[in-house]
Image (cartoon, grey):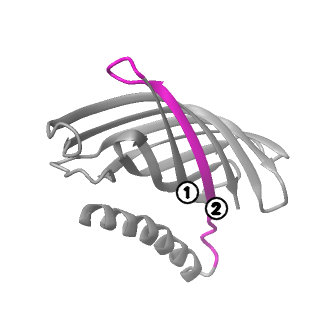
């Protein structure tokens, strides 16, 4: 539980730190904020179709009218039934093709995802792993400063879960994931 609390605190601290850096520089470091929901589906190593969902927050700085770089974090369910969650921290690069009312974009990123168990069963050494994603989509201007984002992409993630099934068989359960999922995103950029 200590690991989960440390992860949640870092998810709050990093975006606040970056926002403070932007204010400290007198506004010369403009930041974009994006909050998005994603839905993922794909086949696992056991050929089972696995679904997941997540909530993400991204803070990014435009380099020019087309390019921006940022940091993305959030929480994703890896396996809801087993109480297995991911907390990714990814560096992201985005290219926007134009600045019209309907602006197509592509984005790519990668980083590390921390894991946590919320099933009430003892964690015997679960570990996160490397992950990455690619997405393509559109930004639709709602107002001059608010945009609706929609995208589709591909997500790769490694993670290991090791726990004891104390509520059923008392067996040690080991899952070594490498998933590849199609991802759908819907978000707001401001």
The mark total stands at 2
Mark 1 or mark 2: which is in front? 1
| Residue wearing tag 1 | 58
Which is nearer the eye, 136 or 2? Answer: 2
126 over 58 or under it: above or below: above
Q: Residue at x 29, y 39 (%)?
A: 159
Give the farthest residue toward the front: 168
| Residue wearing tag 2 | 32
Q: From the top left corner, tell me how far across and down residue 187 is, in percent.
A: 67, 50
Identify the magenta region.
27-48
Give the side of residue 14 with respect to residue 60, left or right. Answer: left
Q: Residue at x 62, y 57 (%)?
A: 34
Q: Residues within 10 Å of mark 1 (few under 14, many from 20)?
A: many
| Secondary-structure class at tag 1 | strand
Q: From the image, which quarter does the C terminus lie in? A: bottom right
Residue 120 visible within the image: yes
Q: From the top left corner, tell me how far across and down residue 28 is, in percent.
A: 63, 74
| Numbered mark located on residue 114 in the image | none
């Amino acid at each position: 539980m200590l690991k989960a609390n440390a992860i949640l605190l870092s998810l709050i601290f990093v975006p606040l730190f970056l926002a403070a850096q932007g204010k400290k520089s007198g506004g010369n470091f403009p930041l974009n904020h994006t909050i998005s929901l994603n839905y993922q589906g794909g086949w696992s190593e056991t050929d089972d179709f696995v679904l997941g969902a997540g909530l993400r927050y991204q803070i990014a700085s435009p380099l020019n009218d087309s390019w921006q770089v940022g940091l993305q974090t959030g929480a994703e369910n890896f396996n809801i039934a087993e109480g297995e969650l991911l907390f990714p921290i990814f560096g992201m690069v985005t290219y926007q093709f134009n600045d019209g009312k309907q602006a197509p974009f592509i984005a790519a990123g990668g980083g590390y995802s921390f894991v946590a168990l919320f099933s009430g069963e003892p964690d015997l050494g679960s570990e996160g792993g490397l992950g990455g994603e690619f997405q393509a989509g559109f930004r639709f201007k709602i107002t001059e400063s608010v945009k609706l984002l929609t995208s589709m992409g591909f997500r790769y993630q490694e993670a290991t879960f090791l726990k004891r099934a104390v509520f059923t068989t008392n067996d040690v359960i080991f899952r070594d994931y490498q998933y590849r999922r199609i991802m759908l995103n819907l978000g707001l950029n401001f």
